[in-house]
Amino acid sequence: MAAATGVLEIAVNDLFQLSAPWWHFVLRAVVVYVMVMVLMRLSGKRAVGQFTPFDLVLLILIGNAVQNGINGGDNSLSGAAVMATTLIVLNYVVALLIARNRRIEKWVEGVPVLLARDGQVFQQVLRRELVSDDDFAEALRMNGVGDVGEIGLAVLETNGHISVVLRKRD
């Protein structure tokens, strides 16, 4: 019985024993968080705003790819707690900075982009922003627009959605 208790104590201790100092996990989480944030920002608004099955697979694979970069091979519960806490605090700090600083907000979230005005669709802008003709047509349908001539403004919002304002009727 004593041997079983000793094995259980060792197993429980292993669950909480960090393989590196706690600050290694904080540093790893910060570096990976910033790296993924920059990569997502560079991928464009549509990648974030309109998830397709391909995007979901990509997101899962990115999570798996950066896992070891964050945990450094540590599988302890303590390491997981340190990393999860760090990521939540980072997310809170970024949200706080965005709410208080317009320049940081523009860098993190981007700015809305004009896709069409007064019935004229800007094809170069659609291509640059990775908005397919089908996605744009879908956005028009979702906003009750039957013809591009009805568009007053079409804007790719910072969240990846396309807002459409109809032209004023004379």
Image (spheres, rainbow, N blue to C red):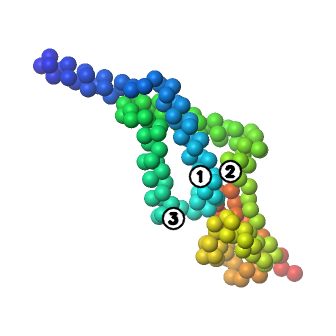
Residue 111 shows which numbered tag? Answer: none
**Residue type beneath disc 3:** Thr
Any mark on residue 109, and which? 2
- Secondary structure at numbered mark 3: loop
Residue 45, image x and y in percent? 64, 59
| Picture mark count | 3
Q: Earlier in the sequence, mark 3 or mark 1?
A: 1
Residue at image mark 3? 52
**Circles 3, 1 touching at the beta carbon (< 8 Å):** no
- For mark 1, does the 10 Å Cα neighbourhood hold few (<14), some (14 to 19), or many (20 or more) residues? some
Tell me the distance, in whole angstroms, between the alpha carbons under discs 3 and 1: 15 Å
Closer to the camera, 66 or 113?
66
Q: Which mark is residue 40?
A: 1
Residue 42: percent from the left, percent from the top? 63, 54
The amino acid on which the numbered mark 1 sits, given as a three-letter code, is: Met
**Residue at 62%, 72% in the rendered image:** 132
Q: Position of residue 69 (x, y in %)?
A: 47, 39
